[in-house]
Image (cartoon, rainbow, N blue to C red):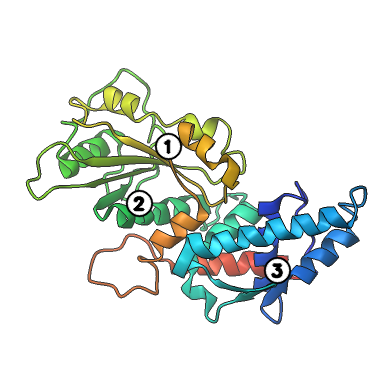
Amino acid sequence: MLSLPKKNPTDTIQLADWLEIYALISGDQNSSRGDLESALRTASLFEPEGDEAVQRKLLEVFQELEDRTTSASQSYPFSLEGNLLSVKKEWHEFPAYVFCLCLSYFGVKQTKGSKAFPRRWFEHISRDALKYYLGGEGLRFGYPRLKDEIPISFENAINFVCTRMKEGGSYRNGGLPDRKDDAVDIIAWKNFPDQLPGKLIVFGNCATEKDWEGSKKTELVPAAFCDDWMTDKPKCEVIKSLFIPHRVERRRFTSHLKRAGIIFDRCRVSYWAHFAGPISKQTGEQRWFDYGVLTKWSQGQLKAAAP
């Protein structure tokens, strides 16, 4: 059996993740309330509190899974029926959710010479999620940039964004060191037919680390970015957002919003990125990212975790 999470083994969100991972690596492609109860009792995690504490935790975990089925909607790769969580057939058709799950649960240690860049890939799917959410245009601004999508140098990238958005004027040297991206990983906007200034603009920061609840959620300051790097800041206030492959406790969600801006957690990211993944019918729009690498990387993580 898959071992319970080493850090915070009684955390409701991590235990829900554990059930999802366990279903993906199990031969019968499912996991159950009984599987989790057996693991909790074997580990004696609730021994002082007794059976009531175990049952209460099981209820919390399955409520979290219920919330995920609603929040991720058609991008959720599992079916939840009573106390049984089953993997949907052809789960690779849900690459964004499974990738975010693996990235959150297993983390990633970037090794020299590796051709896998999970953190950068998360920025790509976050761009797609924000773009489809707005129904507008979006760019991955995070460094290192792809020259086919956006100029690599910081100055040229700023000029490119200002031209595309028709806001911000052009590059301004704020007298600061070259920040590469200055905490802005994604920029998206929605034009009006008149193409005039004054529109919805969103800057996004991506945080794949477990400690996103700390300083990471406050490092992006759109107004300061525009003041430092643009000759003519956008006419309307730029909206701040944070993208994470994790889930957020519902009782703490509103509090995090006050500092992080709009939060796109795993379910929100996967729901909107689902429209750009392999299940969608492509329309000839140029694509900067192949979602197939998400599935390949996720399969490697799951294989390593299998008993």
CB under 8 Å between discs 2 and 1: no
Residue 201 lies, with reference to residue 273, above or below; the image says above
Helix, strand or loop at label 3? It is helix
User: Residue pushed farthest left?
Assistant: 194
Read off the residue under disc 3. Answer: 22
Residue plotted at (9% across, 50% down): 193
Give the spatial CA distance, label 2 vs label 3. 30 Å
- The answer, for residue 117, to whether it is visible in the render is no
Q: Amino acid at mark 2?
A: Leu
* Cα distance in 3D space between marks 1 and 3: 33 Å
Q: Is residue 40 left or right of residue 183?
A: right
Q: Is 185 displayed left or right of 134 in the figure?
A: right
Left or right: where 130 falls relative to 85? left
Q: Which residue is mark 2?
A: 130
> Which one is nearer the viewer's eye here, 84 or 205?
84
Q: Earlier in the sequence, mark 2 or mark 3?
A: 3
- SS state under label 2: helix
Give the mark nearer the N terminus: 2 vs 1. 2
Residue depicted at 64% across the width and 59% down the height: 63
Percent of width and height locating residue 186: 36, 44
Left or right of residue 113: residue 226: left
Residue 164 shows up from this direction: yes
Considering only vertical position in the picture, is 160 above or below 101? above
- In this rendering, is residue 75 above or below 223? below
Q: Which residue type does callout 3 highlight?
A: Tyr
- Image quadrant where one finds the C terminus: bottom right
Residue 190, horizontal then vertical, whole percent: 22, 48
Proximity of marks 2 and 3: CB atoms separated by less than 8 Å: no
Q: Residue 136: image x %, image y %?
A: 24, 53
Q: What's the distance in space between the residues labelled 2 and 1, CA to CA? A: 13 Å
Residue for badge 1: 261
